[in-house]
Image (cartoon, grey):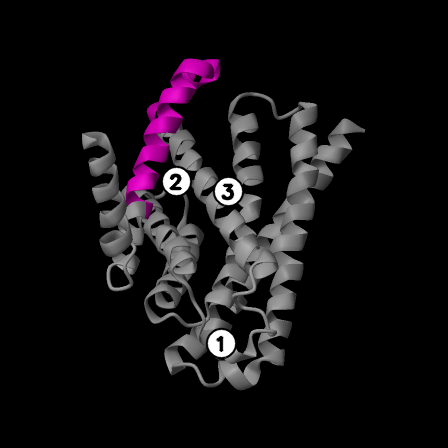
C-alpha cells in the first residue's frame, strides 16, 4: 500500500507540476540538461567496459567520444519526435482547420520534446565553449546558437513548432556522422563499415538536410498568409535560421561528397 501511495503521489507530481503548462518549458529544458549528463556518463561507463580502443585514447579524445554519445542519443530522440509530429500526428494537419492556425499550434508533448532539445543544445554548447576548439570550431558554435535560439523561441512562444520540427528531422544524420568519427578513431577507416556508413551519410544528408529544407520552404510559401501573422521575431526566425543552416548544410555536403569520392577511389 505504501508503494502504491508513493507511486500515485509521484504520478500526480509529474502530471500537475512538472508537465503542467506553466512549468513545462522550464522542466523540459532541465530534463534535457540532466539527460545529457546521464548520456555522457553512460557512454563513458559502457565504452570503458566494452570498447577496447577507448582506454588507449587521450583524455580529450575520450571527452569527445563521450560528447558524441550525448549528441547521438539526442539525435535519435528528437528525430523520432520530429518524424512523429511532421509525418504521423495530425496536430499540424491542414485537415484540422478548426484547431486554429498551423503556426500557433502546440501540445504538451510537442513542447516537451523541444524543451529537451533546448537543454541538449545548452549543455553541448557549454562543453564546446569550455573546451574550445577541441570539440568544434566557430561553425559549431554558430550552428548551436542558431538552432538553440530558434527551438527556444518556438518552445516558449508556441509559434512555428511545425517548422522547428521539420528542421530538427535533420538530426537524423548525426548518428551516422558520429559513427564515422568512431570508426576513424578506432582505426577502421579502411573497413567496409566505414564505406557503407559514408554512403548512408550521403543519402541521409541529401534527404534530411537538402531536400527536406526545400520542402519546408515550399510549405512556408503555401501557408505564408499564416506565417506573416506571427510575431516579427518569430517571422524572422522562420526564414533566417533555415536559410543560414541551409548554407552550412550545403557547404558540409560538398565536403561529404569529396570525402566519399576519395574513399571510393581508394577502394578501386
| In the foreground, 171 or 113 | 113
Q: Is residue 135 above or below residue 248?
A: above
Q: Nearer the viewer, mark 3 or mark 1?
A: 1
Residue 53 sits inside the magenta stretch: yes
* Residue drawn at (28%, 41%) of the image: 34
Residue 190 vs residue 96: left or right?
A: right
Local secondary structure at mark 1: helix
Q: Which mark is residue 27?
A: none
Residue 78, position as x, y percentages in the image: 47, 49
Q: Which mark is residue 76?
A: 3
Residue 145, position as x, y percentages in the image: 37, 59
Q: Decide: marks 2, 3 in contact (CB < 8 A)?
A: no
Residue 167, position as x, y percentages in the image: 53, 60
* Residue drawn at (41%, 53%) of the image: 113
Task: Say which residue label 2 marks.
Answer: 135
Q: Nearer the viewer, mark 2 or mark 1?
A: 1
> Picture quarter containing residue 23?
bottom left
Residue 57 visible, this orientation: no
Task: Say which residue label 1 marks.
Answer: 99
Q: Quadrant of the N terminus?
A: top left
Q: Residue furthest left?
A: 2
What segment is highlighted magenta in the picture? 32-59
Q: Decide: marks 2, 1 in contact (CB < 8 A)?
A: no
Amino acid at each position: 500500500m505504501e508503494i502504491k501511495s508513493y507511486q500515485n503521489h509521484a504520478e500526480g507530481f509529474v502530471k500537475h507540476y512538472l508537465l503542467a503548462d506553466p512549468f513545462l518549458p522550464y522542466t523540459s529544458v532541465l530534463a534535457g540538461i540532466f539527460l545529457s549528463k546521464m548520456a555522457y556518463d553512460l557512454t563513458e561507463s559502457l565504452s570503458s567496459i566494452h570498447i577496447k580502443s577507448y582506454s588507449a585514447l587521450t583524455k580529450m579524445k575520450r571527452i569527445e567520444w563521450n560528447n558524441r554519445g550525448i549528441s547521438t542519443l539526442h539525435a535519435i530522440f528528437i528525430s523520432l519526435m520530429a518524424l512523429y509530429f511532421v509525418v504521423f500526428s495530425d496536430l499540424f494537419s491542414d485537415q484540422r482547420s478548426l484547431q486554429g492556425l498551423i503556426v500557433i499550434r502546440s501540445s504538451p508533448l510537442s513542447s516537451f520534446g523541444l524543451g529537451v532539445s533546448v537543454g541538449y543544445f545548452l549543455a553541448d554548447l557549454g562543453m564546446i565553449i569550455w573546451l574550445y576548439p577541441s570539440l568544434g570550431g566557430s561553425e559549431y558554435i554558430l550552428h548551436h546558437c542558431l538552432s538553440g535560439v530558434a527551438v527556444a523561441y518556438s518552445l516558449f512562444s508556441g509559434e512555428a513548432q511545425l517548422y522547428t520540427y521539420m528542421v530538427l528531422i535533420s538530426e537524423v544524420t548525426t548518428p551516422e556522422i558520429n559513427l564515422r568519427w568512431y570508426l576513424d578513431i578506432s582505426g577502421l577507416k579502411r573497413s567496409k563499415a566505414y564505406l557503407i556508413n559514408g554512403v548512408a551519410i550521403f543519402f541521409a544528408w541529401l534527404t534530411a538536410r537538402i531536400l527536406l529544407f526545400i520542402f519546408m520552404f515550399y510549405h512556408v510559401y503555401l501557408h505564408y498568409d499564416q506565417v506573416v501573422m506571427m510575431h516579427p521575431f518569430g517571422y524572422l526566425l522562420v526564414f533566417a535560421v533555415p536559410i543560414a543552416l541551409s548554407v552550412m548544410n550545403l557547404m558540409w555536403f560538398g565536403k561529404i561528397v569529396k570525402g566519399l569520392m576519395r574513399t571510393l577511389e581508394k577502394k578501386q
